[in-house]
Image (cartoon, helix red, strand yellow):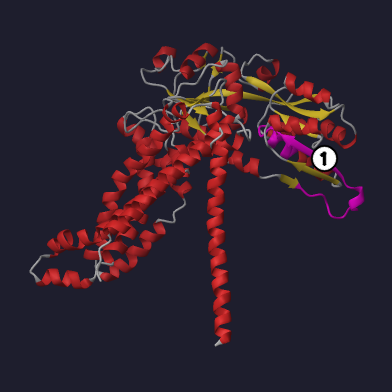
Amino acid sequence: MKKSITLLTTVILMLSLLNNIAEASSLIIKGSTTVLPIAQAVIESYVALYPDIKCSLSGEGSGNGIKALIDGTCDIANSSRFIEVEEAEMAFKKGAYPVPFGVAIDAIIPIVHPENPVDNLTLEQLRDIYIGKITNWKEVGGPDKGIAVITRDTSSGTFEIWDEKVMKGAKVTPRAQIMASSGAIVQAVSQNRLAISYIGIGYMNKYVKGLKVEDVEVTPETVRTGEFPISRYLFMFTRGWPQGETLRFINFILSDEGQKIVERTGFVTIR
Amino acid sequence: MKDLKATDFIAKITISTIAMIGIFILIFILFFLAKEGIPILKSTTLKDLLFGLYWYPTYSPPEFGMLPLIAGSLAVTLLSSLIALPISILVSLFLSEVCPKTLRNILKPTLEILGFLPSVVLGFLGMVIIAPWLQNSFDLLTGLNLFNASILLGLLIIPITGSLADDAISSVPTDIRAAAFALGATREETISKVVLPAALPGILQACLLGMMRGVGETMVVLMAAGGAAIIPESLFDPVRPLTSTIAAEMGETPVGSPHYHALFFAGLLLLLMTLILNLTAIWIEKRWRWQWR
């Protein structure tokens, strides 16, 4: 729900009206809905700092953002994945050189009900649970009860990482319940002792229990070092090496202050 | 005289223009649905689409089997109708035949207000109250399932069907009731043998309209039905109706992709279902409407 609202709403932050229109410079950011909350929070602070900038931000998916960057209709493309070879080739053909900046790290944590005794699962166990091979908690060291598998809709960015890092392309069992938002998943798992699901690190709260994966607990450090296996970088792509306004913005999001905002929106900072 | 004619003319033009705009918009929507939905047949066959068992639209190669979704829609609609329609009819009978007038003046508006309850509120009730209760009392894998969604949908259907059926029963002329009483029939006999048969077409129509509400409802099933794309084998299996599939997936689907066209095709199927119910209602109206005059 929340996602579709952010999708539909193009967030436009107005510049202060005190400035002359001629002096106002603009910054157009498009792309991933996963990066959207980060970009939104950073822009809010950025505009407060430099009130003469007109920022426009929209979330229509990583692919569309990169396409817009190649076409030159935006200055920065947010992406929850690295640029694909085809996209890079298309960009070169059009004379654009996309430059990636990793601005945050997104980690996905498997979660269960707080009363579930299981603490740790291997990637293989997670995969077997999700393809429907393991259907009882006792097979992974829990009580003799069925497992209620809950997953995200297959179009979501969260599912994308899960698919890439855990499922490795295998299909999620059709018996899995599909939920349309991370909020709904937290709600469902906190109410269901038999449930297992996964959420972005920013959605963790005390009503659900995060699992260790391959004996690695999820902390900002283990995510940054890559020890925690279910994570990915979030990128901002610029068209060529950034200059002017774009450079100032990229510098801002990579600064300590910018990274503090990243942390506040529930993602892992890059350092 | 001339002035009157002129104003008549203006009114006529205005009203027919507005009516035409409505019809045009409707035709446009239909056309748009068909235009965006039909191209899915380029990527898959109609048989695989309607009878395929697996809905994996984002994998490669994608699978667009909609049978579990169609089964989900039908199961939720049928079960909620089974729960809600008998209750609705009893409510309407009580309102129009049994209940004293003062009580009716309170109950009927209450019932109608209930019909305006935002479905997202009901869905929330289903997630927070009914789901844990169902799971604990029946020892289920999940409380978000067919039964949960059907109870909630039933709550949405009762005000609509109850209120419309009440209108149908109330419109049976009092002469007929008086005649029945005059012939020595008891109140129970009058209701079951005279009033009910006379109001039956109207009641059936009310039922069908209630079911249409059930087929099209999205928020409640998105929140409470569980969302597993399987053909339900028990009352407590999670299901994924067509409506919630469209709502959950449309936001992140690339425009023009087979997945996008498949979702529009799902919309077309939904439209077809409500159309069938609607046509049945019209047919009942034509065929069985009791002629009083």
Q: Where, by quadrant of the figure, is residue A194 drawn?
A: top left
Can I make out residue A97 in this image?
yes
Picture residue at 35% right of the left edge, 55% below the top: B282
Q: Is residue B139 magenta?
A: no
Image vertical order of residue B260 relative to residue A171, above or below: below
Figure quadrant of the C terminus of chain B = bottom left
- Closer to the camera, B226 or A87? A87
Q: Residue furthest bottom?
A: B1
Residue A135 position, x and y percent, is 40, 17
Q: What amino acid is labelled 1 in the image?
A: Leu
Magenta stretch contains residue A19: yes
The image quarter containing residue A147 is top left
Give the percent coordinates (x, y) of residue A48.
81, 45
Q: Residue at x 55, y 74 (%)?
A: B11
Residue tagged by mark 1? A27
Decide if residue B218 is on the left or right side of residue A239: left
Dot 1: within a 10 Å radius of its alpha carbon, few (fewer than 14), some, or many (20 or more) residues?
A: some
Residue A176 location, x and y as percent?
45, 25
Q: In the image, is B212 to the left or to the right of B56?
A: left
Residue located 53% across and 20% down the image: A211
Q: Which stretch did the figure color magenta?
A: A13-42
The chain that hosts pointer 1 is A
Of residues A84 and A175, the one nearer the viewer is A84
Q: Quadrant of the N terminus of chain B?
A: bottom right
Q: Determine the residue positioned at 56% across, 64% down.
A: B18
Q: Is residue A96 left or right of residue B164?
A: right
- Is B107 on the left-hand or right-hand side of A72? left
From the top left corner, tell me how far across and down residue B270 is, in percent: 45, 42
